[in-house]
Amino acid sequence: MRIICTPSTTTSLSFLNSSFVPTPISNFKTIPTSRLQKHHRHRSSLLCFSSLSEMDATPGPSLYPLHRCKTLHLVRHAQGIHNVEGDKDYKAYLSYDLFDAHLTPLGWQQVDNLHKHVQSCGLNKKIELVVTSPLLRTMQTAVGVFGGEAYADGIEAPPLMVANAGKSDRPAISSLNCPPFIAVELCREHLGVHPCDKRRSISEYQPLFPAIDFSQIESNDDILWTPDIREASEELAARGMKFLNWLWTRKEKEIAVVTHSGFLYSTLSAFGNDCHPSVKSEICTHFANCELRSMVIADRDMMGADPAITNYPGKIPSGLDLPSDVAKEKTTEKGLSK
């Protein structure tokens, strides 16, 4: 593994593997991010290096203690109705007909394919937490990919999604034997102007997704989206770093994140500058709909205090840890001194 970049006081990412294919996104305007700061404190800034000579490292593999790392499985949502219309005419993104865009039938096929992949490679048994952007298309993708099978009456656990939620024409999805799901505002798409990126009220979502935890979202209504100002990519990247810092505060070690192309591209583009160009490309190339890439986030600055569960101390039982001839001599000297 290669360490991608060095943060001034917090985290860095290493690439592990990837699957599925990439597509491009569009450029955006600006929106202040001050309203986001009351939701989560920005704990640090990011410092990246453009070459190995600029950091305290040598070419080749890098090592980090396992208990100072987390594995992130990053997923872009499946195809939404806004993707279809926007590909035909970019101005369609300004249409309120695309408000809080839901998945297309093709998008649900993509979800089914990724769900099968997650099951077949055993990833579903490893993930301890699923974090999703609180928009219809991301929550549909999250529960479809990482949720259980079809929900049946009599199951005590609430469903992750009720039947036909968001014009899905899908049966309810069970939360049985699934990791917890939590919705977080920090990993939303570019804010402002495009109605497809405006969310509904939390009180509207809760009956549709009963088993998703919305407690991290302070406002019932969407107070972050504005109709006339589009968030800048630089501001989105800063929000992405706040999100990574928040992820580091979680106790879970293996986390799935279901979010958006613009969010992923703006956040990950800061990383990989100290790596081979092909690794940089693997990290921050635009995500395709329903693409999954797995990465490692490493604590390089001792932010965390998680114990090393698998480590085992030496010198047990206690005693002289010396070559046998030296130990014999020391023991003899100790006996004569008594």
Image: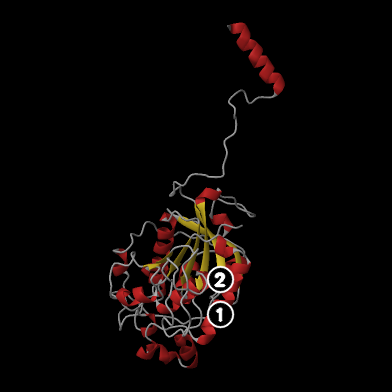
Camera sees residue 132:
yes
Q: Quadrant of residue 182?
A: bottom left
Specify the farthest residue to the front: 154
Q: Foreground residue, 67 or 302?
A: 67
Specify the farthest residue to the right: 325
Q: Foreground residue, 201 or 282?
A: 201
Instruction: Classify mark 2: helix, strand or loop.
Output: strand
Residue drawn at (39%, 83%), measured in percent from left and top?
A: 196
Type of amino acid at the residue the image marks with label 1: Gln
> Percent x, y for residue 137?
44, 79
| Left or right relative to 234: residue 109 | right
Name the residue carrying label 2: 292
Q: Quadrant of residue 233?
A: bottom left
Instruction: Classify mark 1: helix, strand or loop.
Output: helix
Instruction: Tell me how far mark 1 sits from mark 2, CA to CA.
Output: 11 Å
Residue drawn at (48%, 80%), measured in percent from left and top?
A: 171
> Percent x, y for residue 177?
50, 63
Q: Is residue 302 above or below residue 258?
A: above
> Percent x, y for residue 155?
45, 68
Q: Is residue 4 above or below residue 109?
A: above
Question: Which label was assigned to residue 94?
Answer: none
Camera sees residue 5:
no
Q: Foreground residue, 248 or 128?
A: 128
Quadrant into which the N terminus falls: bottom right
| Left or right relative to 276: residue 263 | left
